[in-house]
Amino acid sequence: NQQILLASRPDGEPTVDNFRLVETPLAELEDGQVRVRHHYLSLDPYMRGRMNEGRSYAQPQPLGEVMIGGTVGEVVASRHASFAVGDAVVGMGGWQLYQTVDARQRGALQKVDTTQIPLSAYLGAVGMPGVTAWYGLTQIIAPQAGETVVVSAASGAVGGAVGQLAKARGARVVGLAGGPEKCAYVSGELGFDACIDYRQHPDLKSLSAALKAACPNGIDGHFENVGGLILDAVMLRANAFSRIAFCGMIAGYNGEPIPMQNPSLILVNRMKLQGFIVTEHTALWPQALKELGAAVASGRLKYRESIAEGLAGAPQAFLGLLKGRNFGKQLVKLV
Ligand code: NDP
């Protein structure tokens, strides 16, 4: 087996030296175990938080162990009655070629149907990022038709789904993304009403003016993936009784300070600001996945993937994700 371990903890921005690629032998399967050959690894921003020592909402990733992460693949050997060789499965196999898992553990491995939905989509639009978008939008922002919803990191795995789900509910949707290419995709292929290239607006005055122009009726709902300047600019344009879903604060994941400039606006505008962790809402996953799966199968819900080739490329691709070098869901294809 080939595995990537967390070799050391980063101080600020991580580097490839924080990871180590190792070869390990595969043991014989025991009763109840299933072996999966991974086809794709998911790379996600939350992994940065797990590289730190301090406890956050998730346990830190132990040093010297395989990097945690979502995976899709194919069963290649099984000693569990519910899984057969050839089954397509989703799991939390981590950054390695093969996963050996005790399938008796609830939720350790999920069979998926790839007849209408590509296997890789189960790590994106029909997986954790898709459910994240669905949860924050429907349970926190809950947009009414005609309201204006803003989404940051709009071309990404979560943001792209947020905007399309909001459009389907009759909202006016405005994205924020880094660079003209991403913005063209968001307002073109993804069908957002507008997209602001925040890199063209590096200060609060300029960004809030751009938001004012794109949101003539103010902002009723905001899905926050970034934090910092973007959040401050949105706050200045927020309407009374607006809602902000705090999903991610990627601008601060390497330890950068991201203070909120105008918290008094929460009171003045009677706003609701709510954070959430998608894995804590398992009861709603089936409902979310049903809508997301149907929308992807029918082609209504579009998404894009950035695919790095080979396990050895995972660390570099992960560092790129934290810098916005990905364009859509970041995956690693294990050829
Ligand atoms: P994305 O596919 O959106 O990739 C991350 C994107 O963030 C980059 O492409 C980049 O887009 C943007 N970005 C990175 N650094 C910055 C920065 N300093 N300032 C502004 N934008 C930046 O990732 P995901 O869709 O997987 O995740 C999106 C967010 O959702 C993350 O914050 C993640 O932590 C959060 N999340 C939260 C969950 C929860 O349960 N609360 C679950 C899953 C995800 P660009 O080039 O456009 O700037």
Image (cartoon, rainbow, N blue to C red):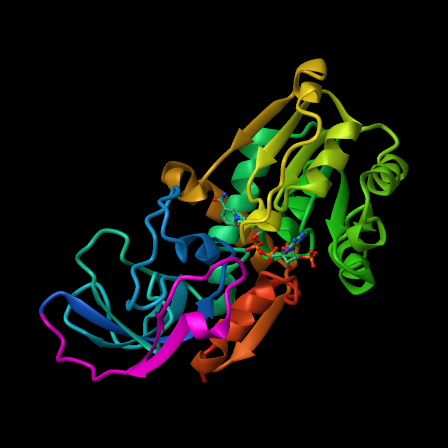
Residue drawn at (28%, 68%) of the image: 64
Q: Quadrant of the N terminus?
A: bottom left
Q: How many marks?
A: 0
Quick check: 278 above or below 332? Answer: above
Q: Residue furthest front?
A: 11
Residue 247, located in which quarter of the rendered image? top right
Residue 104, located in which quarter of the rendered image? bottom left
Residue 91, located in which quarter of the rendered image? bottom left
Does the magenta run of residues contain 29? yes
Quick check: 75 above or below 242? Answer: below
Q: Is residue 268 left or right of residue 244?
A: right
- The x, y position of residue 107, in whole percent, is 28, 53
- The x, y position of residue 192, in whole percent, is 77, 48
Q: Quadrant of the C terminus?
A: bottom left
Residue drawn at (36%, 66%) of the image: 67
Q: Is residue 115 left or right of residue 80?
A: right
Please name whichever residue, 333 or 226, is drawn nearer the observer in this view of the structure: 226
Please name whichever residue, 93 or 13, is drawn nearer the observer in this view of the structure: 13
Does residue 219 appear in the picture of this structure?
no
Does residue 137 appear in the picture of this structure?
yes
Residue drawn at (12%, 80%) of the image: 28
- The x, y position of residue 66, in whole percent, is 31, 68
Does the magenta run of residues contain 65? no
- The x, y position of residue 55, in whole percent, is 35, 44
Residue drawn at (88%, 37%) of the image: 209
Stretch in magenta = 1-30
Q: Is residue 182 left or right of residue 325?
A: right
Please name whichever residue, 265 or 259, is drawn nearer the observer in this view of the structure: 259
Q: Is residue 40 left or right of residue 304?
A: left
